[in-house]
Image (tube, rainbow, N blue to C red):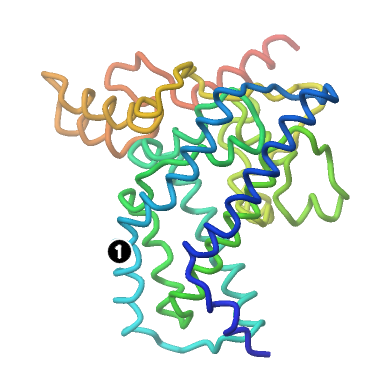
């Protein structure tokens, strides 16, 4: 079954068609929370900030998309096979692309340069659909987009890969909410859900570095990063070191500035400067900060000592 007709629209055209729908759904959620007292936190100023950042992220990231697209189309000359534009090929491409998202997502939590990009998305202390739109504007400068090059080499057309990227992103939009509880067990086992993603956005020590899934939670289950939402431990959203500003430039670029400041500190070894860029978030040359692994270890040590 050919599905070439699915690729008649360019990604930005699809985005501009769907953006009013996302705005409408997000507005419906905050109104439902306000009028029906659904368990969630509203912040109307942040809502409009997040949705505006998300709306602008597409054209701004689109200006630099040539970096990733150029790499993908360059790799096409080295393809060892060519998959046709069929439904089965599209499904396989989506599954493998979702795996590359998992890898990209996990790297961005464990590599400080990648965290400079991803920190923007995690900086809100709420969990709602508008937070899904709180997206960085530097997606093509991290390097993890090149994880998709192997998909091109094994035979998938870059256009098909890009299509899967957008579908994956649109699915994740609906995982950013507190208004949906647990879904059926079989669905929770295979797919990323609001419950799983609430864990991912939490700064509770128990929940750190967990549930990197895009659409399929199976990768977290396979690679040991899955943590279920515990009703006895409500999710506390945001960064370990809170960010309270609504200044979009600070939200977008503060971590990059922090990296630059750390690298330029006087008296550091070359290794320390390297680690401030390529080490995990929270790494410091003098041990004055804590990485997520340290925070988790302290948490489990405390539990052990209190037994």
Q: Residue at 27% across / 22% down in the picture?
A: 285
Task: Work out whether residue 197 can be spotted.
Answer: no
Task: Work out whether residue 217 can be spotted.
Answer: yes
Q: Residue at 55% across / 31% down in the picture?
A: 48
Mark 1 packing: few (<14 Cα in 10 Å), some, or many (20+)?
Answer: few
Judging depth in this view, the residue of 259 and 16 nearest the camera is 16
Measured as percent of width and height from the top left, residue 82 is found at: 47, 89
| Relative to 150, residue 111 above or below | above
Q: Residue at 66% across / 82% down in the picture?
A: 87
Residue ID for mark 1: 66
| Relative to 98, residue 2 above or below | below
| Relative to 154, residue 240 above or below | above
Left/right of residue 169 with respect to residue 36 in the rendered view: left
Left/right of residue 251 with respect to residue 240 in the rendered view: left
How many numbered circles does the render carry?
A: 1
Judging depth in this view, the residue of 238 and 30 nearest the camera is 30
Q: Circle 1 — which element?
A: helix
Measured as percent of width and height from the top left, residue 158 is found at: 43, 75
Measured as percent of width and height from the top left, residue 66 is found at: 30, 64
Occupied quadrant, residue 120: top left
Q: Quadrant of the C terminus?
A: top right
Q: Quadrant of the N terminus?
A: bottom right
């Amino acid at each position: 079954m050919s599905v070439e007709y699915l690729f008649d629209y360019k990604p930005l055209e699809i985005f501009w068609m769907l953006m009013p729908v996302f705005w409408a759904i997000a507005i419906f959620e905050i109104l439902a929370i306000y009028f029906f007292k659904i368990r969630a936190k509203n912040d109307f100023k942040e809502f409009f900030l997040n949705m505006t950042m998300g709306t602008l992220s597409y054209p701004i990231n689109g200006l630099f998309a040539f970096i990733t697209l150029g790499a993908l189309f360059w790799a096409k000359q080295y393809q060892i096979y060519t998959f046709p534009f069929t439904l089965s090929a599209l499904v396989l491409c989506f599954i493998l692309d979702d795996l590359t998202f998992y890898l990209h997502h996990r790297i961005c939590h464990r590599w400080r340069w990648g965290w400079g990009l991803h920190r923007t998305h995690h900086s809100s202390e709420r969990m709602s659909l508008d937070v899904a739109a709180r997206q960085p504007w530097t997606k093509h400068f991290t390097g993890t987009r090149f994880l998709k090059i192997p998909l091109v080499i094994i035979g998938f057309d870059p256009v098909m890969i890009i299509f899967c990227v957008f579908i994956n992103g649109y699915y994740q939009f609906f995982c950013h909410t507190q208004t949906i509880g647990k879904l059926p067990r079989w669905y929770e086992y295979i797919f990323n859900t609001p419950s799983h993603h609430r864990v991912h956005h939490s700064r509770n020590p128990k929940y750190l570095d967990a549930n990197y899934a895009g659409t399929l939670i199976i990768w977290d289950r396979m690679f040991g990063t899955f943590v279920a939402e515990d009703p006895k431990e409500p999710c506390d959203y945001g960064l370990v070191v809170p960010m309270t500003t609504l200044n979009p430039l600070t939200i977008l670029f503060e971590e990059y500035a922090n990296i630059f400041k750390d690298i330029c500190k006087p008296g550091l070894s070359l290794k320390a400067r390297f680690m401030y860029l390529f080490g995990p978030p929270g790494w410091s040359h003098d041990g004055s900060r804590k990485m997520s692994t340290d925070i988790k270890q302290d948490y489990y040590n405390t539990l052990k000592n209190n037994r």
